[in-house]
Amino acid sequence: MRLFVAVTLGETIEHQALAALPKLKGLAPRARWVPPTNLHLTLSFLGEVEAERVPALSEALTRVGPLHAPLVLTIEGGGGFGSPGHPRVLWAGVGGETKALGALQADVAAALKPLGFEPEHRDYTAHLTLARAKVPRGDRELAECVRALQGEKWGEARVDRLTLFESLHGKYHSRLEVPLSKP
């Protein structure tokens, strides 16, 4: 099964994305767009994992939640990964309590490392992936979307849990939810 650990952003952000995405999709109709119900902030991508390993993952993640208090993030602006003229990925920016989110991500990575999941070797930068180019060299139309996202504000999200998701046929299914419960 294909697994990842993430936090979700709630209905307010989903509704704002639903309102904003038609305009963006009109600018880059050939891109692969993330459905608003699948919007999330990935903390750790695990890849293909055998089902027998899920209990150990669940145990490790269950220990992380009580170490962190709920946090508030904002979604505003955006950018692209790849060439500025031909981005491969379009993303919305994340603000608010990003240091707390970074600490949560670091603790998730530390909890999973003994289970054989190596953390990425780059610093964690929170972003909300909105679309991907269908071709490896990027999509000039996504550059128009980057410009359209400047100045956008989609509101606040209260993050109160981390979730172990399974990706199955393009849909995400929650396998475990761990409340952030530090007082």
Image (spheres, rainbow, N blue to C red):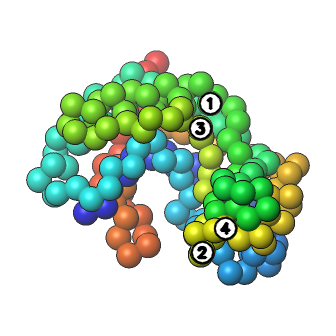
SS label for mark 3: loop
- Displayed quadrant of residue 140: bottom right
Amino acid type assigned to the residue bearing label 1 in the image:
Thr
- Mark on residue 125? 3
Looking at the image, is mark 3 or mark 4 nearer the viewer? 4
Looking at the image, is mark 1 or mark 2 earlier in the sequence? 1
| Residue named by callout 4 | 138
Circle 3: is it few (<14), some (14-19), or many (20+) Cα within 10 Å? few
Q: How far is disc 2 from disc 3 in space, using C-alphas?
A: 24 Å
Where 141 sits versus 10, above or below?
Answer: below
Q: Of the residues under marks 2 and 3, which one precedes in the sequence?
A: 3
Do the residues under discs 2 and 4 have CB atoms within 8 angstroms? yes
Q: Reading the chain from its start, which is encountered first: label 3 or label 4?
A: 3
> Where residue 28 appears, x then y in whole percent?
75, 75
The three-letter amino acid code for the residue at tag 2 is: Val
Q: What residue is drawn where x is 64% and y is 28%?
A: 97
Give the Cα distance between marks 1 and 2.
31 Å
The residue identified by callout 1 is: 98
